[in-house]
Amino acid sequence: MYKLISYWTAPSAERQDEFEREYQDTHIPLALACPGVRRAALTRTPDGLGGPPAFYRAVEIEWDDRDAFEASTASPQWAALVEDTVRMIETYGVSTQGALGTPEVHDPSPGMAPVDEILTTTRAVRRRLDLDREVDPEVLKECIELALQAPVGAGRAGPHFVVVTDAAKKKVIADHYRDHGRGLLAAGVEGAEDEEARKVMESALYLADILERVPVLVIPCVQGRWDTSTHADQSSSFGSVLPATWSLQLALRSRGLGSAWTTIHLYRKDEIAELLGLPADVTQAALLPVAHTTGGRFKPASRPPVDDVLHWNSWD
Ligand SMILES: Cc1cc2nc3c(=O)[nH]c(=O)nc-3n(C[C@H](O)[C@H](O)[C@H](O)COP(=O)(O)O)c2cc1C
């Protein structure tokens, strides 16, 4: 990859809206029209590092390699972009500086593809849920839209997601969760077989204690009741909601939000269905507390070695 990074100084405060309109609607489309341009990443830079910001805007434009960049900058489209840059500079009294190079990417897990990183670091987040920061409903909606790409059994209704942000309703759900779960989880702490299991139980107990303070509770549901249905039917029904639930957790993680798969509220599913006005034929699958995460990175979990659980052609 070959990258051009340009920095722009700020237009006067009165002309910023006008500048923004022209920059986004005219200038950047001209950049994207240049042959070989793969991507333009735009950043408005309102925040400085321990002082006022050093510049107003940055744009990073990417080509496959230096040859592609050179071919691109020899094109009439590039000439039109340069002309527009000069026009913007003269019109708004701004200046721009640029630099070029081949990026070297150093990510926190070298060698791991971004999707693998998300798959291995989407943990049950409880103690690191930020109880004081609101979750943007648009971000949540975007994650749910992505989750809807998960598979659904043929001819089955897909998942629904009931999002609870109402403080009074969260309190009722949390009370049911604690009423049923507290004793169970406390016994889990007492009876934990090892340090790791005890920590999980303690963290689950913590979640029970603060559940109503988590900004968002999401209850994935699916249409249909299968209390008396066949194994295949039950599998198809749960299989039409659980993949989407996990996709939702992955999408949340990729946007800096944490969640935890929980099921304790299901012991009070009828009371919660009534509270949320769920139709009688709707089944709740889980409850995800959702919030931004506080500090720290998430590490892959300890899981059994793959050879202990992988069976080729037969169980033995
Ligand atoms: C089916 C299922 C039900 C779960 N129910 C709860 C629950 O009710 N409360 C809770 O705090 N965690 C619950 N968990 C989360 C597990 O405790 C979690 O997977 C465990 O803490 C390990 O976390 P990790 O995946 O980050 O290693 C549940 C997980 C699964 C898969």
Image (cartoon, rainbow, N blue to C red):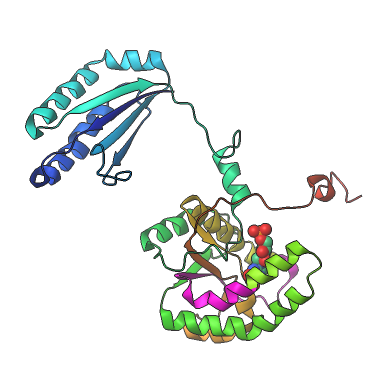
Picture quarter containing residue 209?
A: bottom right
**Residue depicted at 62% across the width and 86% down the height:** 179
Above or below: residue 99 compared with residue 314: above
Report if residue 14 is visible in the image.
yes
Picture quarter containing residue 76?
A: top left
Looking at this rendering, what residue extends furthest in the front direction? 50
Q: Where is residue 195 in the image (x, y as percent from the top left)?
A: 76, 63
Depth order, front residue of 115/194: 194
Q: Is residue 192 magenta?
A: no
Ligand 1 position by quadrant: bottom right
Q: Position of residue 316 (x, y in %)?
A: 92, 49
Q: Position of residue 296 (x, y in %)?
A: 54, 52
**Residue depicted at 72% across the width and 65% down the height:** 232
Q: Find the magenta span and give its range.
A: 205-232
Left or right: residue 186 versus residue 164 is right
Q: Which quadrant, please, contains the N terminus?
A: top left
Left or right: residue 95 versus residue 316 is left
Depth order, front residue of 41/229: 41
**Residue depicted at 52% across the width and 54% down the height:** 253
Above or below: residue 307 compared with residue 289: above
Above or below: residue 157 compared with residue 186: above
Report if residue 277 is visible in the image.
no
Q: Where is residue 144 in the image (x, y as percent from the top left)?
A: 46, 59
Q: Does the magenta stretch include residue 230?
A: yes
**Residue depicted at 14% across the width and 46% down the height:** 17
